[in-house]
Image (cartoon, rainbow, N blue to C red):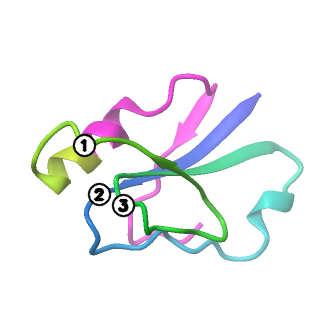
Amino acid sequence: MKVLVYTAIFGDKDEAPLLSGDCKSVEYEVDFLCITDNIKLTSPHYNVEFTNPVFSDVTKNARYYKIQGPKKYWTMILPLGMIQV
């Protein structure tokens, strides 16, 4: 069973969230993904996937990708910005 924890960050005002502890060492198959249009964005925890914006508004782009989500996972978790994983 593949599980995905993901976020979408567009524009250059935010950074990828930090994960507490060593989340990648859990016994389950969990992937961490950050979808962005910012080629400068990096993360020690999330795999960063670059994509082209659909809209001219960064908030609409982030919401679009958060709602769509990647389709190859059995379960997808989208934590809110105020929650630490």
Horizontal relation, residue 67 to residue 17: left or right: left
Q: Residue 77 lies in magenta, yes or no?
A: yes
Question: Pointer 3: residues within 10 angstroms few (<14), some, or many (20+)?
Answer: many
Question: Residue at (42%, 73%) from the top-left corner?
Answer: 15
Question: Residue at (38%, 42%) from the top-left corner?
Answer: 51
Q: Residue 13 lies in magenta, yes or no?
A: no
Q: Is residue 40 above or below residue 57?
A: below
The magenta stretch spans which residues?
63-85
Q: Is residue 17 above or below residue 7?
A: below
Horizontal relation, residue 80 to residue 28: left or right: left
Magenta stretch secondary structure, dominant: loop
Q: Between marks 2 and 3, how big is the CA–CA gap?
A: 7 Å
Tag shown at residue 10: 2
Q: Between marks 3 and 1, how big is the CA–CA gap?
A: 10 Å
Amino acid on which the number 1 mark rests in the picture: Pro
Tell me whether the residue at label 1 lies in contact with that at label 2, contact meaning CB atoms closer than 8 angstroms: yes
Q: Of the two numbered discs 3 and 1 on the same chain, state the one appearing first in sequence.
A: 3
Q: Kindly state the secondary structure of the residue where label 2 is placed.
A: loop
Amino acid on which the number 2 mark rests in the picture: Phe
Give x and y (percent) for residue 75.
Answer: 60, 32
Give x and y (percent) for residue 9.
Answer: 35, 58
Give x and y (percent) for residue 63.
Answer: 25, 45
Give x and y (percent) for residue 84.
Answer: 54, 72
Tell me whether the residue at label 2 lies in contact with that at label 3, contact meaning CB atoms closer than 8 angstroms: yes
Q: Find disc 3 in the rendering and name its residue.
A: 38
Tag shown at residue 53: 1
Question: Residue at (36%, 30%) from the top-left corner?
Answer: 68
Q: Kindly state the secondary structure of the residue where label 3 is placed.
A: loop
